[in-house]
Each structure stands twice: as structure tokens, then as C-alpha cells.
Amino acid sequence: MRSATVPALAVLLAACGTNDTFPCRDASQCVLGGAAGRCEAVGWCSFPDASCSGGFRFGDYAPPEIAGTCVGPDGTVVLALTAAADAWIDSGKPGVAYGLSATLSADGDPAANILLRFDLGGVPAGARLLQATLQVTTTPDGALAQGSADVYVLRQAWAEGFRDDRVGSPNWTMRDDTTTWAGPGASAGARGDAPIATFAPSTASTRFAVPVPLATVASWVAMPALNDGLVLVLRDAGSAAAKIHAREAGDPNARPRLVVAYKP
């Protein structure tokens, strides 16, 4: 599986001794002075260090707030949170639910949107958040041919349900079995006014790492009742579609994740 986060010149520039940061996609990119490191879920290399309780310390090419800190409770804690709920909703089938689908589809025309929610209960109140990244993986036929995907914060609660391609909720008009969305398809009124992130899932079988504003995650940690999750909406896609693996996917590494790094 490919990753969309690693610059092609990372190895070359690292050798030049610059102070830039370089993400990793696997452990093969984490070698320092002949010592093999790890590629942590947050996307940065760590290397063996016996002085850390977890045995590893982030390398110098991680962001400044993370670089040089231990991986674990005595330094930087990294949580990879698989989606607690997900679904997709389809304007072409406005009464049909896809809460148990193993694939989530976002379409341009007819419109279809993807719903995601993550449980932040594992992040302690008062923790200093350092980084938050949404990770989604396209399916073998899931590349978006044109346009991009906007990520919005949802402002209304929804229930994943227990149906796949059957009449039920959530759907284009209903966010649960009894309540309609403020705007069809979790549009205006049901979500934030502006996207918090934008990315283009333009290649198949690829994990995309999308930065999420720390203020968004902090609000969910401080007030869990505000955590209604995210909605992915295509822009300028025409009739194109993007497909990503759902939390029901057979490969755990392909499921949607929110990776959070923090200091206790």
C-alpha cells in the first residue's frame, strides 16, 4: 500500500543535513547511523533509546514539538484511533443506509458524502496536543479522477445504524431513525461553514494523511458531546467518485484512523 505523505527527496535532503521535517510511511525509511528505527503511526521516525521507558525516541526530522522526545508516557504519546462509526449517504438513494458497508463512497454527481466519527476518550483532559492526522485509504478502484475532497466538522449527531444498502438510517435525509439532517446530505446547518482540510485522493490503494486542526480535536477532548465527527464532501468532481475502506474492512491498517500525538 502506498502513502501520499512522503516527499521523494526526503533521503537526499536528509543527507544534506537540513533542518526540515520528513514523514515516513514504513520502517525502511527509518535508518540512522546503521540503526534500524520504527515508523510511528503519527508518520515520523523513532529510534532505539534505552533511556526512554518505551525504548524509542523520535528522530531529529520529526516536527520540533516532537523531535527528540521519547515515544510513550514519558514523552510523546501516539494514539491511532480507528473510526468508532462510519457510513456514506447517497442523494441518488436518499432513503438507503450504508452504515455497515466495508467501502465508503463519496461522489460528485449524484452527490454522496462520507461520515466519520472517532472516540477521543483515550486522550486525557489537559493533555498538550501536538499533532492530529486523519488517515484514509483508497480502495483498488477508489481513485478520484478529478476534483478534491473537503473535510468538514459535523455539527449534528448521527447514528451509524446496522444496515448496508438497505432502507434505513443514516441516509441523505435522516441522521438517525427519527431525526432529519438540518441540511440534506449533512450540508449547511449540519456541518461547519468552511472545510477544515482539503485533499485529493487521486491514486488507488493509497493511504492519505490529512492534517486536522488541533483546535478541532481539543474541542472534542474537552467537550465530548461536541464530537459529531467529520463529513467528506467532493468538490469540482463532476461525476467522479472516491472510495475508501471503512472500519469494517478486512485489513485493519486500511480502516479510517485519527492519529493523535500528545504530551500528558
Image: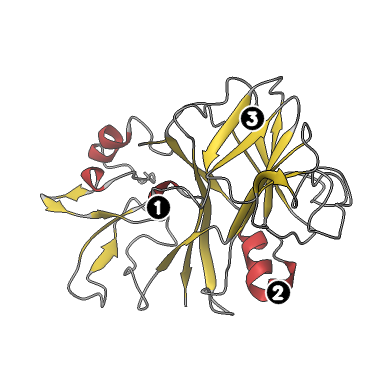
Residue 188 image point, x, y percent: 86, 45
At mark 3, the secondary structure is strand
Bin the neighbour count of mark 1 within 10 Å (Cα to Cα): few under 14, some 14-19, many 20 and up: few
Decide which of 173, 50 is in the foreground and name it. Answer: 173
Query: Residue under circle 3?
Result: 148
Q: Alpha-carbon distance for marks 3 and 1?
A: 25 Å
Mark 2 against mark 1, which lies toward the viewer? 1
- Mark linked to residue 73: none
Visual colour scheme: secondary structure
Left or right: 179 as drawn, with respect to 65: right
Q: Alpha-carbon distance for marks 2 and 1?
A: 28 Å
Decide which of 49, 179 is in the foreground and name it. Answer: 179
Q: Which amino acid type corresponds to the residue marked 2 in the rendered image?
A: Met
At mark 1, the secondary structure is helix
Q: Alpha-carbon distance for marks 3 and 2?
A: 30 Å
Can the viewer see residue 4 in this picture?
no
Q: Tell which circle, 2 or 1, labels the residue nearer the N-terminal end.
A: 2
Decide which of 19, 202 is in the foreground and name it. Answer: 202
At 66% from the left and 61% from the top, the residue drawn is 215
Residue 135 image point, x, y percent: 50, 48
At 70% from the left and 40% from the top, the residue drawn is 113
Q: Residue furthest front?
A: 166
The quadrant of the image that shows the N terminus is top left
Residue 230 image point, x, y percent: 67, 52
- Mark linked to residue 252: 1
Bin the neighbour count of mark 2 within 10 Å (Cα to Cα): few under 14, some 14-19, many 20 and up: few
Q: Are marks 2 and 1 in contact (CB under 8 Å)?
A: no
Can the viewer see residue 40 in this picture?
yes
Q: Quadrant of residue 22?
A: top left
Query: Residue under circle 2?
Result: 223
At mark 2, the secondary structure is loop
